[in-house]
């Protein structure tokens, strides 16, 4: 059985048209790690031929966050249609595809499994190479789409609903985590604070908007830097500070200004993120920093990071707004670099809730 599966992998890889120039390599990518069912077709690691996202936000909104079991079931219902649309909007058939890429980790394991099973079935049926992509690698690669001049090495500050990580991007496929969150991810903290303020889900964009009319220094929330020189993060104390503030005001029957709270919370977490990201770039002796992940859409983060980078002569990059949050294009871009380096997966590929870059 193992031999049979490995043979499938080899024949699939051999069937890829190796005469094609790298500019013409076409990847069909699938992303289903959380609450977006997405598929995209990407040519030459940069050109978007299609970009389909079926969002489940409206379903999860009523629960104030993503319900994993509901997410998996929706992915299952949606995935075939999303993949078909990605191909038809690209104006291609499966014959034109050189490789199938899929997010294999990290994420909600039941959600990831739907994408992985679909990608494996397509790779087997169409005899195409299968490429497993680390979701965070995908977020980092979203920066290559519009920034042709961006090349490793650089530091990527990954800020999303599930992650807050400082990543050393040594090369296209060689990434190392220098620091990460020890508790809540920054997007998770945004979402929880938004919930307590009664703003809705997802909370990040709503806090971003509301904070524009608030005073960032109205309330002095904790900025947690951890041990000296640590590149790790901890946001649960700051988040709890907001919850305690709101609860104590409510109990005392006092009102509070939501915009001030949103702005003060945001400034507290962003100060820490900006300081640590810039410190990582300087420590490595690099000159470039790339934001990645859903929270990199945040307007205040972009402003504060730009100011800090200007002072240190660091070039700052961030993806377009659509490419900040989860999508399959970024998975296709990461897969292109893996494909060019011959880093294919086999049909034993499994979904993992958590894994480091070098595990898949
Ligand atoms: O990268 P992403 O789509 O999913 C994960 O991989 O987790 O990130 C989603 C997160 C959510 O927590 C959402 O509230 C946050 O990104 N987010 C924002 C903004 N837009 C999305 N947070 C702050 N400001 C924004 N403008
Ligand atoms: Zn993500």
Image (spheres, rainbow, N blue to C red):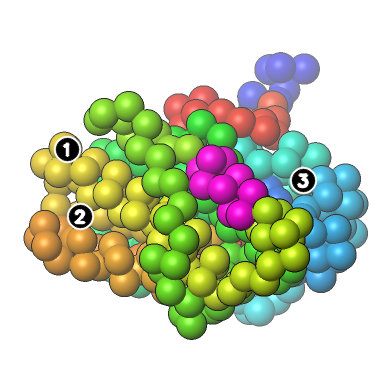
Q: Which residue is mark 1?
A: 284
Is the CB of mark 3 within 8 Å of ligand 1?
A: no
Asked if labels 2 and 1 touch by Cβ distance under 8 angstroms, the answer is no
Secondary element under disc 3, as helix, strand or loop, is helix
Q: Which quadrant of the figure contains the N terminus? A: top right
Q: In the figure, residue 224 lies in which quadrant?
A: top left
Whether residue 278 sits left or right of residue 343 in the image: it is left
| Crowd class of label 2 (few under 14; some 14 to 19; many from 20; radius 10 Å) | many
Which sits earlier in the primary sequence, circle 3 or circle 2? 3
Which region is colored magenta?
235-245
Whether residue 289 sits left or right of residue 239 in the image: it is left
Alpha carbons under labels 1 and 2: distance apart: 10 Å
Between circles 3 and 2, the one closer to the viewer is: 2
Q: Is residue 242 magenta?
A: yes
Q: Which residue is mark 3?
A: 111
Q: Is residue 10 magenta?
A: no
Q: Which residue is mark 2?
A: 288
Asked whether 270 or 173 is in front, the reply is 270
Q: In the figure, residue 267 lies in which quadrant?
A: bottom left
Whether residue 65 sits left or right of residue 128 in the image: it is right
Alpha carbons under labels 3 and 1: distance apart: 36 Å
């Amino acid at each position: 059985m193992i031999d049979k599966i490995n043979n499938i992998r080899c024949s699939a890889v051999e069937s890829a048209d190796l005469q094609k120039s790298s500019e013409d390599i076409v990847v069909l990518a699938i992303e289903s790690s959380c609450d977006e069912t997405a598929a995209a077709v990407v040519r030459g690691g940069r050109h978007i031929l299609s970009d389909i996202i079926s969002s489940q936000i409206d379903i999860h909104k009523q629960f104030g966050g993503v319900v994993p079991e509901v997410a998996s079931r929706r992915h299952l219902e949606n995935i075939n249609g999303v993949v078909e649309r990605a191909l038809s909007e690209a104006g291609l058939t499966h014959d034109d595809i050189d490789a199938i890429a899929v997010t294999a980790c990290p994420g909600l394991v039941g959600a990831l499994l739907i994408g992985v099973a679909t990608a494996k079935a397509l790779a087997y049926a169409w005899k195409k190479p299968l490429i497993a992509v680390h979701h965070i690698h995908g977020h980092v690669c979203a920066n290559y789409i519009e920034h042709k001049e961006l090349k490793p090495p650089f530091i990527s500050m990954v800020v999303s609903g599930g992650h807050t990580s400082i990543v050393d991007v040594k090369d296209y496929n060689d990434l190392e985590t220098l620091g990460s969150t020890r508790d809540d991810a920054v997007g998770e903290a945004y979402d929880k604070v938004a919930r307590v303020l009664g703003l809705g889900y997802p909370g990040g964009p709503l806090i971003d908007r509301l904070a524009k009319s608030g005073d960032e220094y109205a309330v002095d929330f904790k900025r947690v830097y951890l041990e000296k020189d640590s590149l790790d993060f901890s946001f649960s104390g700051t988040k709890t500070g907001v919850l305690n503030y709101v609860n104590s005001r409510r109990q005392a029957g006092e009102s509070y200004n939501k915009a001030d709270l949103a702005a003060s919370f945001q400034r507290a977490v962003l100060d820490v993120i900006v300081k640590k990201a810039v410190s990582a770039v300087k420590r490595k002796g690099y000159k470039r920093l790339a934001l990645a992940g859903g929270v990199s859409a945040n307007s205040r983060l972009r402003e504060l990071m730009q100011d800090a980078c200007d002072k240190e002569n660091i070039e700052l990059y961030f993806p377009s707004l659509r490419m900040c949050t989860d999508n399959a294009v970024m998975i296709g871009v990461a897969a292109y670099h893996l494909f060019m380096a011959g880093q294919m997966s086999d049909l034993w590929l499994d979904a993992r809730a958590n894994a480091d870059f070098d595990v898949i």
